[in-house]
Image (cartoon, rainbow, N blue to C red):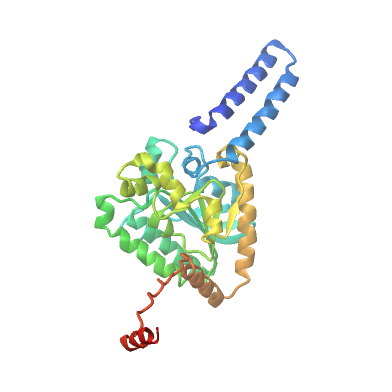
Amino acid sequence: MSNVVLDFEKPISELELKVKELQSLSDLNDIDVSEEISVLTKKLEETKKLVYSNLSAWQRVQLARHPNRPYTLDYVERIFTDYIQLHGDRRYAEDAAIVGGFAKLDGKPVMIIGTQKGRNIKDNVYRNFGCPHPEGYRKAMRLMELADASNVPIISFIDTPGAYPGIASEERHVGEAIAVNLRDMFKLSVPVLAIVIGEGGSGGALGIGIGNKILIMEHAYYSVITPEGCAAILWKDRAFSSKAAESLKLTSSELLKLEIVDEVIPEPIGGAHYNYDQAAALLKKAIIKNLDALCSKTAGELKEERYQKYRHIGKFTEVKEKEEALPPPADEEKEKSEKE
């Protein structure tokens, strides 16, 4: 796995390098530098807290896209057991950008569906950089219907910049595939838990994201469009991506304020890519808590809850313009002038 360091992470990287150098010096020359290492380690932790507690929206987007960040299958490996991956949409082809299948969560059966990115060029080409084709969404819906028939809760992991916008995708009707998923996910009788673990971009994310509860990782984002796409439309220049990120209110804390997401899942200091196991443990805790609450509800309650949740997303206020005062009738004006 490549060691990618973002610009705002450089002070942290430099301190980590110094700690490693001191540790190496101690091991090679049998010198006691434990005090110096302790001082640097303390400074490193303080720097991490300072940097990661003051991130801008654009910096959080960069963290959400970090190439070392855990993806769907990394969480599946650490949280679930007996995972059986299912393939194909039974209409056209297999889409590796969406993975899914039955698994067990602490011995209880669940259906897992998620977008999956690659770690290197070869894997990213195979996964289409996490951008699903229409057959990916149709496969996801097939698995959701299978879960519904089996009375098994659905857990959806979202991590995509958006659906694939190429010609082949349009020829096979990606818009229709997403629209059908939006419609049919509202009909599901089982609990649906949607979790944004990285990027949550546009309809590509929403196509598997109609849930009774929407959770989001601390450094993930969820937006109707990517910051670059927004900047290209509004300012005709992607250099304004950071400004667009602030305007879109796409960070986990902003989404919680707007009541678009139901819960923010904390990450290890520095992001989930610093500690996969700790990130998975925090995610598992949130999944179990929310599924336990959802599984106690009837099919009718789950459908109504899902419907009402999305009906209330997007609040706005209407302000009526003040009506201009009409001039008094001519008779009243004449009578007033005569009195004067």
Taking depth in this image into account, of 223 and 167 the one nearest to the observer is 223
Instruction: Judge left or right: residue 46 versus residue 157.
Output: right
Q: Residue 89: percent from the left, percent from the top?
A: 36, 59
Number of numbered discs on residues: 0
Query: Residue 289 sits in which quadrant?
Result: bottom right
Residue 116 seen from this side = no
Q: Quick one: 236 or 68, which is closer to the camera?
A: 236
Q: Nearer the viewer, residue 140 or 4?
A: 4
Image position of 114 with respect to 238: above or below = below
- Side (left or right) of 46 relative to 128: right
Q: Residue 232's spot in the image, x, y percent? A: 32, 46
Indicate left or right for 214 with 247 as reference.
right
The residue drawn where x is 48% and y is 72% is: 307
Q: Residue at x 62, y 55 (%)?
A: 286
Image quadrant of residue 172? bottom left
The residue at the far top in this view is 29
| Any part of residue 68 in sight | yes
Residue positioned 43% across, 55% down in the render: 205
* Residue at the (54%, 77%) spot, across then down: 300
Residue 258 rendering spot, x and y as whole percentages:
52, 60
Image position of 190 with respect to 286: above or below: below
For the C terminus, which image quadrant?
bottom left
**Residue 88 location in percent, x, y?**
38, 56
